[in-house]
Image: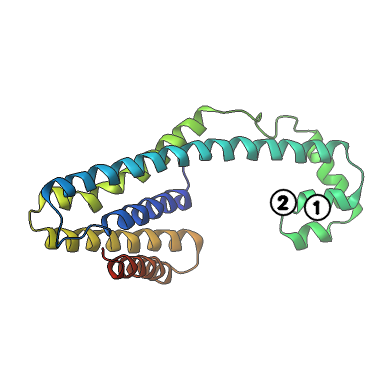
Amino acid sequence: MLSPYDRASEVLFGLIMALTLTGALNVASATEQETRALFVSTLACNVAWGFVDAVMYVMNAVLGRGRALLLDRALREGSDPARLRALLAEVLPEQVAEGLSATGLDAARRTVMVHPDLHAPARVQWEDVLGAVGVFVLVVGTTVPVALPFLLISDLTLAKVVSRSLALALLFAGGYRLGRYSGVGPVWMGLTMLGIGAVLVAVVTALGG
């Protein structure tokens, strides 16, 4: 249900949030109870964020269908060329929409009119629910490799290094995947995401993390 862009984006958001929370642990004074509390709080925070993000995913899907239906209605009923071009510019490159002649606009209207079921109704569908579940799982799932070292490794300094290393590696992998999908350049995008994570680690460390 989710595009590669959606999947990579949710992983990156979850990683950055988890990295921010785990980076706040001061290993010099942290107790075993505090490290366990860190794991719980990191997981709880990403659960909350995953829930919010899942709800917004469903809302965006429904609102997108509503906007598409509005465009359909305008094409069926409208006659103002400027208004029609403005609406078409939402789904076509602006240069293409602006270059449409009156004949082209009429052809677009006729195409819409012969397909009354071109767009789904503006309501929640089963695919939206599945996509929302996917968003939630991705955001929460990224918490585990970042927070789990604090439960499995008794040396807190080593646990923090392992946690950050895993987070940065996953940031690069997520950015690489996003770059491949978008055509921006996978290595460049991976390094960009890695750089953002590195800067984040440096900031929280400077602040006492």
Q: Relative to 39, is 130 on the left or the right?
A: right
The answer to whether any part of residue 87 appears in the image is yes
Q: How many marks?
A: 2
Q: Residue at x 57, y 36 (%)?
A: 59
Quarter residue 169 falls in: bottom left
* Residue occupying the far left of the picture: 154
Q: Residue at x 76, y 41 (%)?
A: 71
Q: Relative to 120, is 175 on the left or the right?
A: left
- The location of residue 33, given as percent across then percent down, is 14, 45
Q: Amino acid at mark 2?
A: Glu
User: Dot 1: within a 10 Å radius of its alpha carbon, few (fewer than 14), some, or many (20 or more) residues?
Assistant: some
In the displayed structure, would residue 161 be above or below residue 148? below
Element at label 2:
loop
**To which residue does mark 1 refer?**
86
Looking at the rendered structure, which numbered label has been put on residue 90? Answer: 2
Element at label 1:
helix
* Residue occupying the far front of the picture: 29
- The location of residue 32, given as percent across then percent down, is 11, 48
Front-most of residues 60 and 101: 60
**C-alpha span from label 1 to label 2:** 7 Å
In the displayed structure, would residue 91 be above or below residue 137? below
- The location of residue 67, given as percent across then percent down, is 70, 40
Q: Amino acid at mark 1?
A: Ala
Front-most of residues 160 and 6: 160
Q: Relative to 77, is 176 on the left or the right?
A: left
Mark 1 touches mark 2? (CB < 8 Å): yes
Looking at the rendered structure, which numbered label has been put on residue 77? Answer: none
Colour mapping: rainbow
- The location of residue 74, given as percent across then percent down, is 82, 39
Q: Residue at x 34, y 54 (%)?
A: 15
